[in-house]
Image: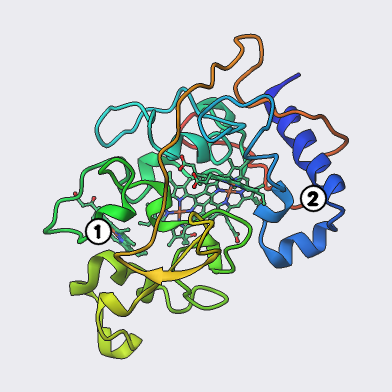
């Protein structure tokens, strides 16, 4: 089965399993439609945290390093074109993206350790991808329904650049960051220096060679209407 077909099949099936209508899914946030199993596979995982997809080909253009050890390798299992190791779902490109996978230069950004993955900036420094996150674009900070207060998010790490008075943020300590990674506390907002963004995990997953990395099981029927399938990738043309 080809990768992309497998993924669309899996996503549609997850929709059916959860019994959620596609229209409701859009209103609530598109990861709802992914319904746990698109990202986590209980029996056929390819990465730690029982993750269902992984981009094993993408190299970080900022430093030539592999994405192994970053959550980015998981996200880009979906959010990169097939040519670059993803599933072609709403792809973003590291070549054109805000830096990730680097140890922050403190003159450029003030990032507390708990927002980093093994000392490096990662997708989860900015996003909490779980369906329980009500924020625009799964950002950690509430920036309004359409991201109209995006400055409020950027100040998390670049406060010297923002008009703090205008956006009504007294200091970065007063910011509220969403997390679903502390089951004891529940899904809620935390202070910037207290938020838990990832927990250690035992590495034991050995993906079966015969299962292509981004084929997700179980299988399904048709591609959901809300999946954005790009016509072409300018980096590959
Ligand atoms: C869009 C992808 C996505 C979806 C959908 C998703 N997760 Fe996750 N999940 C993640 C990521 C990313 C991590 C963190 C991985 C890491 O730290 O390496 C994670 C981590 C977890 C963890 C480990 C928590 C920890 O503290 O280490 C659990 C448990 C979990 N998810 C359960 C769920 C459940 C249950 C659902 C469905 C309600 C779900 N996830 C839906 C992406 C997703
Ligand atoms: C199993 C596939 C899958 C994985 C893995 C995945 N996503 Fe998604 N994501 C989706 C789908 C499907 C959509 C909706 C696509 C569309 O709108 O066409 C989406 C949409 C998004 C959006 C846009 C939300 C909006 O409201 O429009 C963001 C932001 C996002 N994902 C971030 C992430 C991050 C960060 C990770 C890794 C932690 C991740 N995703 C991992 C499938 C995935
Ligand atoms: C510095 C913070 C930051 C980091 C790091 C970051 N993002 Fe985002 N992301 C954003 C913001 C802000 C938006 C909303 C603005 C936009 O769409 O460009 C967004 C939007 C998105 C979207 C929706 C794009 C669309 O089609 O509109 C996806 C998908 C996404 N991010 C995935 C990722 C993945 C995967 C990673 C890691 C490789 C990542 N992000 C790292 C801040 C970040
Ligand atoms: C979680 C922390 C964090 C958030 C939130 C964040 N950034 Fe950054 N930003 C960084 C880090 C880390 C760097 C890289 C620092 C370095 O050069 O080592 C950076 C670098 C940059 C750069 C310089 C890029 C370059 O190539 O030198 C720009 C511009 C920037 N960020 C803009 C933004 C904007 C705009 C937002 C809000 C949409 C944002 N950042 C949100 C952490 C963050």
Q: Residue furthest top?
A: 210
Q: Nearer the viewer, mark 1 or mark 2?
A: 1
The residue shown at (53%, 37%) is 80
Image mark count: 2
Q: Nearer the viewer, residue 229 or 224?
A: 224
Q: CA distance from mark 1 to mark 2?
A: 39 Å
Q: Which residue appears at 76% of the width and 18% of the height? A: 1
Q: Position of residue 182 (x, y in %)?
A: 48, 56
Residue 114 image offset from top left, x and y in percent? 31, 54
**Tag on residue 83?**
none
Residue 149, quarter of picture? bottom left
Label disc, if present, on residue 112 of the rendered structure: 1
Residue 24: quarter of image? bottom right
For mark 2, does the 10 Å Cα neighbourhood hold few (<14), some (14 to 19), or many (20 or more) residues? Answer: few
User: Where residue 138 sits: x, y (%)?
Assistant: 53, 61
Residue pictured at 55% horizontal, 74% vertical: 146
Residue at 27% from the left image edge and 86% from the top image edge? 170
Q: For numbered disc 1, what is the local secondary structure?
A: loop
Q: Are marks 1 and 2 in contact (CB under 8 Å)?
A: no
When the figure is inspected, residue 66 is found, relative to residue 173, above or below; the finding is above
Callout 1 crowding tier (Cα within 10 Å): few <14, some 14–19, many ≥20 = some
Q: Which residue is mark 2?
A: 225
Q: Residue furthest front?
A: 184
Mark 2 secondary-structure assignment:
loop
- Within 8 Å: ligand 2 and the Cβ of disc 2? no
Colour scheme employed for the rendering of this structure: rainbow
């Amino acid at each position: 089965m080809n990768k992309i077909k497998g993924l669309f099949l899996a996503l549609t099936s997850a929709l059916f399993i959860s019994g959620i209508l596609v229209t409701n899914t859009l209103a609530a946030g598109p990861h709802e439609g992914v319904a746990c199993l698109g990202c986590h596979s209980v029996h056929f995982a390819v990465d730690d945290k029982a993750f269902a997809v992984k981009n094993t080909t993408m190299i970080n253009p900022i430093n030539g390093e592999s994405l192994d050890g970053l959550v980015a390798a998981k996200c880009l299992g979906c959010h990169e074109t097939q040519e670059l190791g993803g599933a072609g779902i709403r792809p973003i490109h590291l070549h054109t993206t805000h830096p990730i996978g680097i140890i922050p230069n403190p003159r450029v950004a003030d990032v507390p350790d708990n927002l980093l993955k093994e000392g490096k900036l990662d997708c989860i420094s900015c996003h909490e991808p779980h369906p329980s996150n009500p924020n625009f674009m799964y950002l950690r900070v509430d920036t309004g329904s359409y991201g109209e207060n995006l400055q409020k998010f950027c100040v998390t790490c670049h406060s010297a650049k923002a008009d703090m008075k205008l956006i009504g943020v007294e200091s970065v300590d007063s910011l509220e960051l969403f997390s679903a990674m502390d089951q004891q506390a529940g899904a809620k907002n935390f202070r910037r220096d207290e938020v838990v963004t990832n927990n250690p995990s035992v590495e034991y997953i050995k993906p079966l060679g015969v299962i292509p990395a981004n084929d997700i099981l179980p299988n399904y029927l048709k591609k959901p209407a809300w999946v954005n399938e790009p016509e072409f990738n300018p980096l590959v043309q």
